[in-house]
Image (cartoon, rainbow, N blue to C red):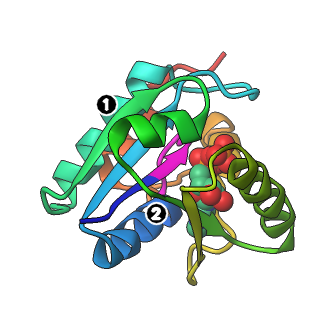
Amino acid sequence: MTIALYPGTFDPFHNGHLDIAQRALALFDELIIGVYDQPDKKLLFSHAERIALVDEVLREVGVDGRARVTGYSGLTVNFARQMGASVLIRGLRNSVDFNFELQQAQTNHWLAADIEVICLFANAPNHFLSATLIRQIATLGGDVTALVPDCVARALRRLKYT
Ligand code: ADP
């Protein structure tokens, strides 16, 4: 049985993330969506909120019970080992992602050669989507309903921007 870990910041979880998660679930026996605690980025949602939103998305879209979400801190490969995951899933949109993911994958291989990294390419219409873009549009009052699962759109509308 192969458990895959899809790690990310997911601030917020959008349709591109969901597509990668669903395709990974079709390839592996179990999928854990791991939400990083404190990435080196300015965040819109707290760690607890990001975890709760992914959980809500999984229930809302009816993803089967082989997928679940967990928050974590520290090294991703340590968390993967702790969860019994032997595969890390990442999504690739373009060459910028590729260069970043290559270095990450090589670093992770050096840290933990027993964990394999599998990258899935973003599909249209999600290849231009990024959490940064969604945060920007939403905080400027734009409508991102078509880019995110319904519960994420509702959570963005509830936020008060100052
Ligand atoms: P991180 O801080 O780890 O980059 P993100 O939440 O931004 O966290 O992204 C998590 C993963 O999802 C990364 O592998 C990223 O490349 C991938 N990803 C982000 N946006 C998309 C998209 N539109 N389509 C497919 N994969 C994506």
Image location (x, y in percent) of residue 122: 60, 76
Q: With 53 as the anchor, is 137 left or right in this view?
A: right
Q: Residues within 10 Å of mark 2 (few under 14, many from 20)?
A: many
Q: With 56 as the anchor, is 77 left or right in this view?
A: right
Sequence-earlier tag: 1 or 2: 2
**Mark 1 CB within 8 Å of ligand 1:** no
Say which quadrant the C terminus sits in: top right
Instruction: Give the SS element for disc 2.
Output: helix
Image mark count: 2
Q: CA distance from mark 1 to mark 2?
A: 16 Å
Image location (x, y in percent) of residue 154: 35, 39
Image location (x, y in percent) of residue 144: 52, 54
Relative depth, front residue between 13 and 82 = 82
Q: Quadrant of residue 51?
A: top left
Q: Quadrant of residue 106?
A: bottom right
Q: Is residue 103 something one can see in this rendering?
A: yes
> Label 2 belongs to which residue?
15
Q: Is residue 131 something one can see in this rendering?
A: no
Amino acid type, mark 1: Ala
Q: Residue at x 64, y 26 (%)?
A: 43
Residue 11 lies within the magenta run: yes
Q: Residues within 10 Å of mark 1 (few under 14, many from 20)?
A: some
Magenta highlight: main SS:
loop
Q: Residue at x 38, y 76 (%)?
A: 23
Amino acid type, mark 2: Asn
Relative depth, front residue between 127 and 20 = 20
**Mark 2 CB within 8 Å of ligand 1:** yes
Q: Residue at x 63, y 55 (%)?
A: 113
> Label 1 belongs to which residue?
52
Segment colored magenta:
6-14
Say which quadrant the N terminus sits in: bottom left
